[in-house]
Image (cartoon, rainbow, N blue to C red):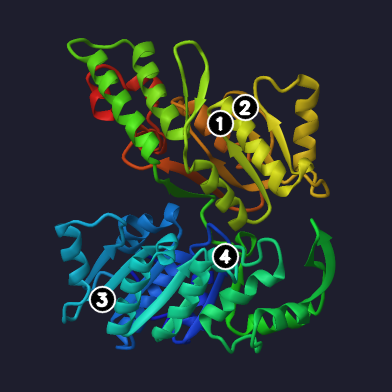
Amino acid sequence: MVRNYRFKTKPYEHQLVALEKSWDKEEYAYFMEMGTGKSKVLIDNIAMLYDKGKINAAMIIAPKGVYRNWLSSEIPTHLPSHIQYKSVLWTALTSKTKDKEYQSLFETDYNLHIFIMNVEALSTPKGLTFARKFLSCHNTLIAVDESTTIKTPRAARTKNIVGIASLAKYRRILTGSPVTKSPLDLYTQCKFLNEDLLGFASYYSFQNRYACMVDKWFGGRKVSIVKSYQRLDELSKIIEQFSYRVLKEDCLDLPDKIYIKREIELTKEQIKLYQSMKLIAMAALNGKTAKAPHVLTQLMRLHQITCGHLTTESGEIVDIENNRLNELMEILEEVEGKVIIWSFYTHDIRKISAIVKKTYGENSIVEYYGKTESEIRQESIEKFQDPRSPVRFFVGNPQTGGYGITLTAASTVIYYSNGYDLEKRLQSEDRAHRIGQKKSVTYIDLIAEKTVDEKIVKALRKKINIASEVLGEELRDWI
């Protein structure tokens, strides 16, 4: 079935193996490292079940930064051409047009019905009610992308998502890092697949089997915390029965460079400021052809807003409420090994460094930017490159760290924000992708949709040097 299937995009060998192990199973976990193509595997799995008459619908639950990408990119790219389908994206705001889209999911026809929700929506009564209705009306495969988002047993969204899972005929979870902080993270992810998979009636019985607990007093209250873990070989053998684990280093036929985007939703404050600044920029351009420095100043102010701050006329940096830092921290939970984080703005480097230290420890990150002292720079590189060092993260800007240094300890590179210079982007990409790198390198761009931020990334990926090529009238299209 699998090897002879009519795929739209050719699968890699590890993707074929994943499908051979899983395609007709009622529950399965794709524990595939970011960059190995787990989204394609899920889409092909859905297509195979649909072709065999096993399902007529699919529901995909994903984090905010990812879920739109399923509609706009993953499904159109990978779903086989012979399958007629309709796909609808959940949004918090309703309209007559949106209501018609929702109703189309319940029409009696031969189309594959695909419904995509962001995981946060399942915390709301409205989102939960609609999800129940969709699952109850179809023979469905339900999947949770980045399933560590349901690792917390007491969280409302975890309870809700686990609660509706049994309404689906088939269940899948996808993540590159199923255990982010503790083996206990696996419990609710596996419970979503099937309550009986692990063989424990409750989280506490699971916890007592695989963790040694100790009581501590905090503020006059007794709290049980994990002292150590036990029987992990036993747990691994159980998990292996219904999961497929693959790392980039295991995949010999992957391309050298893999590009991924994570979308950032602007906050209300950002939208208001962005629209206001956009009007000012257009007024400044009206009736004249702007010179390059003026053009880039207008772009930079709009770009700063998408990144969560703005430099005033007096030089003061004002922070704006934003979702970018939270999205970065979600990605860091999902990826394996050492990570390079590039940021165009020094202000953001400091914020990134502070939150990473708070989350992963003081010695988990090194900084590399203009104000980093010369004698510290080489030491920072050596610490990052040393596999025995506690340093897991390297944060810097391409203007300083993008040239001449080797950072091959990382195979994941995150662009928190981009500049306008193509050469600096290409040079910064090659800090990880050079002699000594033994894996494919995954590049993740954080992008604020429908803003100058999105246009910058698209231009850089097309190898357009914005600094020299976007002038005058062209800027109107960018703004």
The residue labelled by disc 3 is 112
Q: Which residue occupies 32% across, 10% down?
A: 291
Residue 313 horizontal/vertical position (percent): 44, 12
What separation in Å lies between label 4 and label 2 (alpha carbons)?
Answer: 35 Å
Q: Earlier in the sequence, mark 4 or mark 1?
A: 4
Where does residue 66 sit, x and y in percent of width and height? 43, 55
The picture places residue 22, in percent across and down from the top left corner, at: 50, 82
Binning the other alpha carbons within 10 Å of mark 1 as few (below 14), some (14 to 19) or many (20 upward) gives: some
Q: Earlier in the sequence, mark 3 or mark 2?
A: 3
Q: Vertical placement of 81 versus 376: above or below?
A: below
Q: Are marks 4 and 2 in contact (CB under 8 Å)?
A: no
Q: Which mark is residue 403?
A: 2
Q: Is residue 97 above or below residue 384?
A: below
Badge 2 amino acid: Tyr
Q: Dot 3, how many residues are within 10 Å of its Cα: few (below 14), some (14-19), or many (20+)?
A: many
Question: 438 or 223, which lies in front?
Answer: 223
Circle 2 SS class: loop
Q: Earlier in the sequence, mark 4 or mark 2?
A: 4
Is the Cβ of the residue at disc 1 closer than 8 Å to that at disc 2?
yes
The amino acid marked with disc number 4 is Thr
- For residue 97, side relative to residue 465 (left or right): left
The residue at which mark 4 appears reads as 148
Which image quarter is the C terminus in?
top left
- At label 3, which amino acid type do we have? Leu
Name the residue that disc number 1 marks: 427
Q: CA distance from mark 3 to mark 2?
A: 49 Å
